Image: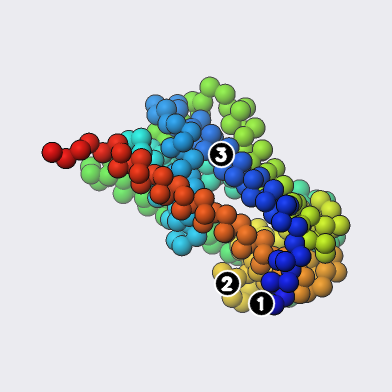
Amino acid sequence: MSILWGAWEKADKGYLMLMAVVMMISHVLRAVRWQMLLKPAGYNITLKDSFLSVMIGYLVNLAIPRGGEVSRCYNLFKLGNTPVEVSFGTVVVERLVDLLCLLLLVVLSFFIEWDKLMGFLATLNMPSGSFTVSPLLLIAVAVAVGFAALIYAFRNNPKLRKLWTGFREGMLAVFRMENKFLFIFHSIVIWLLYFGMSYTVMLAFDQTASLGLRAVMSIFALGAIAMAAPLPGGAGSYHVLLPLGLTTLYQLPNADAVAFVFIFHAWQTFVLIVAGLASLVISYWLIRWKRPAIK
């Protein structure tokens, strides 16, 4: 703890605040992108409702992985009467687009830092191809089977058919957007802002400020791999793999690498909690204000 506190005291708080600003801008753009997806489905939601719901989703995700995807749709329903099944369909489209953007960044990272990243992965003593094939293949198969089962259930159960219709409407809305280029542009900018978040945090620490943009690319690639790598600790693989990567690839002292990763994650989580709680309170009062008075 003393190492982490010492690193926090030495960190340039200006860059950390800049990172928070960049992160909030990315979330505003996410809210705008959600508006764009829901419009062709026939729902003109306000930016305020979209942003509040997105932030509540991030807050819930901190406690229940992926639970935020449902909670933000429910919050949007309470704020603007947008059917949950329709908005959830658009969220699935969002996540597919984000997955594509992440994969493109990982591929670009390996293209730029191929020797370093492959050399580092070779030192992990993982079974050949395990971090790319086994877990990802199993996850893909499980998702495909589960999705097929859901489609079958929704189509063949009269009570669920209406939900399926709305969900499909939300997913297909992306093909009816008037300006698809703008949607793609927003998606690219969102991920560039994520890149900027990592870079501004690196600039906040003397030990990482000189590592450069290539190190940010490596952080992106290792972060993605950490989600699938069969490392001891499971959920903590991000906090294991990234410090190890910074130490091995860029000769950063282990204590500094651990401090950087933990403070980066903790600061990002803190900002999300503050913004999420504020959004939750504002949404609560907006919903109460909209509710007709009971006579």
Q: Amino acid at mark 1?
A: Met
Q: Which residue is mark 1?
A: 1
Q: Residues within 10 Å of mark 2 (few under 14, many from 20)?
A: few
Q: Position of residue 196 (x, y in %)?
A: 72, 47
Residue in the foreground of this view, choosing between 114 and 255: 255
Residue at 61% in and 28% down: 182
Q: Amino acid at mark 2?
A: Gly
Q: Is residue 15 visible?
A: yes
Q: Is residue 13 above or below residue 232?
A: above
Give x and y (percent) for residue 67.
43, 55
Can residue 165 be seen in this snapshot?
A: no
State how far apart marks 1 and 2 are (Cα). Answer: 22 Å
Find the residue positioned furthest to the left: 295
* Badge 2 element: helix
Report the residue at 62% width, 34% height from top.
186
Looking at marks 1 and 2 on the same chain, the residue that comes earlier in the sequence is marked by: 1
Determine which residue is flagged by label 2: 234
Q: Which quadrant does the C terminus fall into?
A: top left
* Foreground pick, 140 / 276: 276
Which residue is drawn at the image coordinates 27% and 44% (left, top)? 160
Q: Nearer the viewer, mark 1 or mark 2?
A: 1
Q: Quadrant of residue 209?
A: bottom right
Image location (x, y in percent) of residue 224: 65, 58
Q: Which residue is pictured at 30% across the width and 38% down the height?
A: 289
For badge 3, the amino acid type reads Val
Disc 2 vs disc 3: which is toward the camera? 3
Q: What mark, if any, has residue 28 been given in the picture?
A: 3
